[in-house]
Image (cartoon, rainbow, N blue to C red):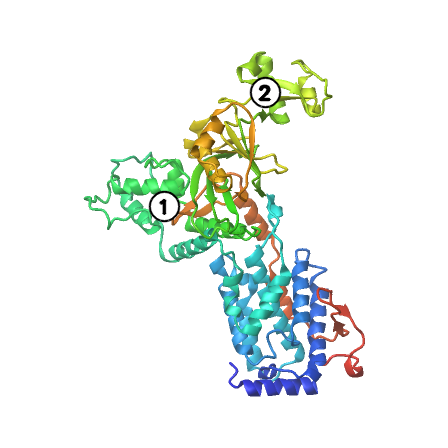
Amino acid sequence: MIKNNTVFLHLLMLFILTGVLLTSVSAAAGVTKNNHQFADVVVNNTLKQYYLQQVPVTEEFDKKLWQALDDLYFLSPLPFVWLARENTPELIEQAILTLEQAEENGLKNSDYQPSVLRSVWSDLWCKKSVTAAELARFDIALSLSVLQYLSDLRYGRVSPEQVSFNLYPERRYDRLVSQLLQAIRQQTVSSLSTRLQPDLLPYQQLKQALAYYRNLEQNYHFPVLVFNDKVEPGFFGPQISQLKSMLEVLGDFNQAGSDEMIVDELYQGSIVDAVKQFQLRHGLQADGVIGKKTLSALNQPISKRIQQIELALERWRWLPALPDSEALILVNIPAFKLWVYKQGGLKSSADIEMNVVVGMAKEHQTPVFMKRLQYLEFGPYWNVPKKIAIEEIWPKIQADPDYLQKHNMELIPGFNASDDASVAVGEDLPGLIESGRARIRQLPGNRNSLGRVKFIFPNRHAVYLHDTPARSLFYRDRRDFSHGCVRVQHPEQLAEYILGLGNGWQRQDVVKAMSKSQKRQVRVKYPFQVLIFYNTAQVIDDKVFFFEDIYHQDTLLSQKLNDLTSVASNIENLLQLPAANAPGIKMNKVGARIVANTTLPHGQSSIPD
């Protein structure tokens, strides 16, 4: 490393002043006001060459990232971002160490080439002489790598829209540039990861889980369990001891904490309880019976669980800002669970947790989105969607003319009908419904499919939370039975919590409103956001839970991530650029593209290598 910063500064000043080759990379430390123009040209020519070489031929190259790189050098007080400073060695070491720790956040170190950058930096230091172009290429490559890492860490590697998530985070690359320059100035580059990663409690918990499962993958060999039939309490067999060891490592079984007499090969007592906890953590029926599903979950490789955690971390990075000043209702679709947080910033534990029923996986998937809760509707009508009315109810009407009356439904003019229109059941009913001239609705009451209350957050998907008379479904281990809306297990508790915060309602007010068979809307006065989300890994009560990928979203996201063009190849290409002898470059304003300027300083016709 550089031993004397004073010599380091002096030598680069000599280089900038004379324009000759450096005798040591330690010269890349400082420039004077009168020499900035020369260094600017070298750096900007290199940026221009990189832009011309990479952007037109790399379709997946993030244009916003290029813009950020452009802005970074325009706003930098010195021609170089990392070099040309008294503390250059410390800054570069902080930056490379930060890149080397990317995997702590579920990212890949290799995407940012820290080993290549460290090697190039070492080579530059050891060479007897270096060129201005070599210094510029290294400085820009390090900037590109760090910006890409910060972007991935803050906003994610792919856009949520690419996997049909209706989330629209604001990608503020200008803030990344500003924070990077500030960190360089304050010598706090090593803390950038902590400042920019999501400070959400679920994200931080998953980071800890990721470290734990990676340690398991490296240090523990999990056997493959084989049982020829269901394993129930009382079973005796040689693999039970392996099962105990496995569950102890996973944290579900504490053999040392049990005072019962342990028979290694007997399946009873505390090991059965451990299997129940394992089943609960993996979205299975917690009955202690090891059937096909439980055996499959036990034999899943740890690498699969690691991947689930990494994908969950990626999705948390997609979220827009979640202010503490607003409450949050969070639904995790594959978990079939709902949580309510008074402080919506997800920095503390939930106040309420309950089971939910979500959209059927094959044809009525619940969408992912976030909207503001606006009102509760007690005694709701159920306006039957056109598709359900035509494809499901119409065949039942044909089979039983009294179907509507038996199910407390009525046929009324549609929203597109004239004021004096009337409709009756007939062969043309599907056409009338399709055209909007007729519709079916279910009257308020105990048999209403929406139950006694629904929670409205207007959205283009026509999805909402609601009560339901089908209570038994909440006790199934897999709960995707709806047409897309989310049915909640304890609507009274949810309504009391929501209206108690801002509307001053108490339990008896909710019970009274839900007991009446007439429609009543109550606007929510306390701000609530509703986030319908999707993650197959989540920490609940300090335990890591894994859920079935019912909508195959993990598969889709994995494919999108694998298809990404890694910035690693851009960094390698940048470091291998030829000498920067292109026309001079200037940046005419913040955020502007680098543009060619054929007028070089001091009448030069080309830039020295």
Q: Look at 70% across and 22% down and name the residue there.
A: 437
Image vertical order of residue 555 relative to residue 594, above or below: above
Front-most of residues 449 and 430: 449
User: Circle 1 sits on which residue?
Assistant: 224
Q: Is residue 609 visible?
A: no
Q: Secondary structure at mark 2?
A: helix
Q: Residue furthest top?
A: 401
Quadrant of the rendered structure where residue 546 is?
top left
Between the C-alphas of marks 2 and 1, the distance is: 49 Å
- Residue 575 versus residue 127 in the image, above or below: above
Q: Residue 144 location in percent, x, y?
A: 62, 66
> Which class describes the residues within 10 Å of circle 2: few (<14), some (14-19), or many (20+)?
some
* Spot occupied by residue 476 in the image (x, y as percentages of width and height): 42, 32
Numbered disc 1: secondary structure: loop
- For marks 2 and 1, the one nearer the N-term is 1
Q: Quadrant of residue 352?
A: top left
Amino acid on which the number 1 mark rests in the picture: Val
Residue assigned mark 2:
393
Residue at horizontal 75 percent and vertical 72 percent from the top: 585
Give the side of residue 608 with respect to residue 323, left or right.
Answer: right
Mark 1 crowd level (few <14, some 14–19, many ≥20, 10 Å Cα): some
Choose between 413 and 470: the one closer to the eye. Answer: 413
Visible in this render: residue 232? yes
